[in-house]
Amino acid sequence: GPLVDKLNELKKRGWVDHWGGSNWHVDRIKEFNAYAAETGQQGFTVNNPNLSLATVNEPMWTDCHTIPSDERAWHTETQFPLFSWSAGGGGWFAYVESDDVTRVYANEENRRRRERAEELGKKFGATANQVALAWTLAQPYPVWALVGPANVDQLKANAEACDIALSPDDVRWLENGD
């Protein structure tokens, strides 16, 4: 309650207009928005978890939240917008080598997913990383991808992923290989 009240107070002052939660589980967002609705106030308008084609072995940082399939289903059902951080799997699909990337993303499933992203990339003239970003953007609900390019060329390459139109079959194949 108090956070809803405070955010709505800031809105009345003109300091904020919309807000969301980073690394919040959907159940917490539902509670937040239920209180907002009960009191005639604005609730969250966006969710900000990690969503990537890459699966995680463990959270990148303490209290990070990678959205599980049941929460993805809720987003599909409600069309609640999602703003994904680390949409490219922390650089996994761009072959970034670091202890953190290895700790969080190095697993057999991600190796297979990266191979499939490379293969599908040939069809689109795209890199595995661009295909992975396109996967994030191809979800059946409003989604934006937050990326961390290291230079202008990477920024341009990430932006080009927006032009890749993956079909639902492509999305499934990237995830499951079938």
Image (tube, helix red, strand yellow):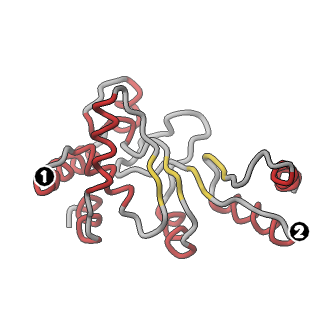
For the image shown, how many numbered marks are present on the structure?
Answer: 2
**Quadrant in the picture for residue 94:** top left
Badge number at residue 39: 2
Say left or right for 15 vs 86.
Answer: right
User: In the rendered image, which residue does mark 1 sit on?
Assistant: 119
User: What residue is rendered at 67% in x and 62% in y?
Assistant: 27
Q: Nearer the viewer, residue 21 or 149?
A: 149
- The spot of residue 49 in percent (x, y) is 55, 50
**Residue mark closest to the camera, 2 vs 1:** 2
Tag 1: amino acid: Glu
Relative vertical location of residue 152 with respect to residue 107 in this rendering, above or below: above
**Quadrant in the picture for residue 99:** top left
Badge number at residue 128: none
Q: Nearer the viewer, residue 98 or 87?
A: 87
Picture quarter with the N terminus: bottom right
- State the CA–CA distance, disc 2 to disc 1: 51 Å
Q: Nearer the viewer, residue 46 or 34?
A: 46
User: What residue is rendered at 69% in x and 52% in y?
Assistant: 19
| Mark 2 or mark 1, earlier in chain | 2
Say left or right for 143 vs 153.
Answer: right
